[in-house]
Amino acid sequence: MNSIFENTRVAFASKTDLELRKSYWLFRLIASPLLNKIGTLSVQILLKLGAPIEGLIRSTMFSHFCVGTSLEESQLVVKKLKKINVDSCLNYSIEGVKSEIGFEKSLDQTLKILAISDSNLGTPFVVLKPTGFGAISLFKKVSESIKLSSSEIEAWERVKKRFQICCVKAVQRNVKILVDAEESWIQPALDNLVEDLMETYNKENIIVYATIQMYLSNRLPYLKSLLVKAEKTGYQVGIKLVRGAYIEKEIAYAQINKLPKPVCPSKEATDINFDKALNLLLKNLSDVAVFVGSHNEESTLKALHQMDTQEIAKNHPRICFAHLYGMSDNISYNLADQGYNVVKYLPYGPIKRVVPYLIRRAEENSSIANQTSREMELIQKEIKRRKQI
């Protein structure tokens, strides 16, 4: 079955020879920790100085990992992907929202995405970033059960209202809401909020999905308890399953605050956690829907094997495999070619505002050596194949 991800003709069918070579050199740059660090630091400094480098960013990192500067521009990629049976999940990837005005702008942008999202047109999912809707300090206080002031109570009610507004719109549009996970020290408030939303909106259909980060050692027990609670309460569960995105921050926070490390002791332990969680979800599809957010080929193959063993249809409506735009095309497009449900996560936004997202992509790819080397290996294989035609 491993050969399913080796078909580079399918994986890179949409890329020209020039685009393939650009992708190869980009991943080669990212693969070098030193060059990566120098490059990302230089970009940040030059932008602060007002240097005219947006064109350079757009032609390199931005064009590879993002789909446009506006919602309208992103639709070109959505339509392109739909033609090869790949769905899209649009995300306005700006970060650092801190004010009530900013939170309202985030809500407005999310509603604009919801307004054009349509399962039939290839956009069945919309992402909600919780800290785009409320202050981190507020989530932390609620998570620690600290008494809120009257103004904080009002602010928390506004946070919940923003989520409610989006869920109502999602029901109207017949699309699904993926609520992003956050750092562990503000996750408890988010868990309670999302569980309330699932209890309200996941009675008949599964509209709301919680994101579970499996590099946190307590998330598998939490997932098991959530399934039990949902069954008793009478609602269904949507889960976006990921390994996680905040491991360095988690370790640093634990050290500074003299707390036990919340992360799994090793990469292998995280992989085991992830595979156990996915196995559990696939065995409970009568009450669960799962959005598999993984670039790990081995975990994906295990999922395919389990689906085959349980005689689960490739296009089962409650299972989809998702990957970031610009990464793991060999998994995405080969799965879609075989008839599985596949979603590409499509970031967009003004270039300057999206730079933090791009830097995180560069840092993550650099820290996962096997990811970049695998990307380069496959690109080289496809370039060689084309030369032999």
Image: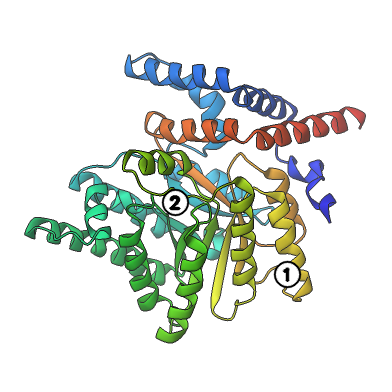
Residue ID at (37%, 52%) = 129
Q: Name the secondary structure under disc 1.
A: helix
Look at the image and name its color scheme.
rainbow
Mark 2 sits on what residue?
Answer: 262
Query: Where does the image place residue 252, in percent across and percent down from the top left?
Result: 39, 38
Q: Amino acid at mark 2?
A: Pro
In this rendered view, identify the residue nearer to me: 59 or 280.
Answer: 280
Q: Position of residue 2 (x, y in %)?
A: 82, 52
**Within 10 angstroms of label 1, few (less than 14), some, or many (20 or more) residues?**
some
The residue sitting at 56% across, 25% down in the picture is 60
Quarter of the image with the N terminus in it: bottom right
**Label number found at residue 307:** 1
Distance of label 2 from label 1 (alpha carbons): 31 Å
Position of residue 149 relative to residue 226, above or below, is above
Quadrant for the C terminus in the image = top right
**Residue 313 image-quadrant placement:** bottom right
Please name whichever residue, 159 or 101, is drawn nearer the observer in this view of the structure.
Answer: 159
Among all residues in the image, which is located at the extreme left?
150
210 horizontally vs 277: left or right: left
- Pointer 2 local density, CA inside 10 Å: few below 14, some 14–19, many at least 20: some
Q: Give the residue type that dot 1 points to.
A: Met
Answer with left or right where residue 247 lies relative to residue 376: left
Q: Viewer-nearest of labels 2 and 1?
A: 2
Sequence order check, earlier mark of 2 and 1: 2
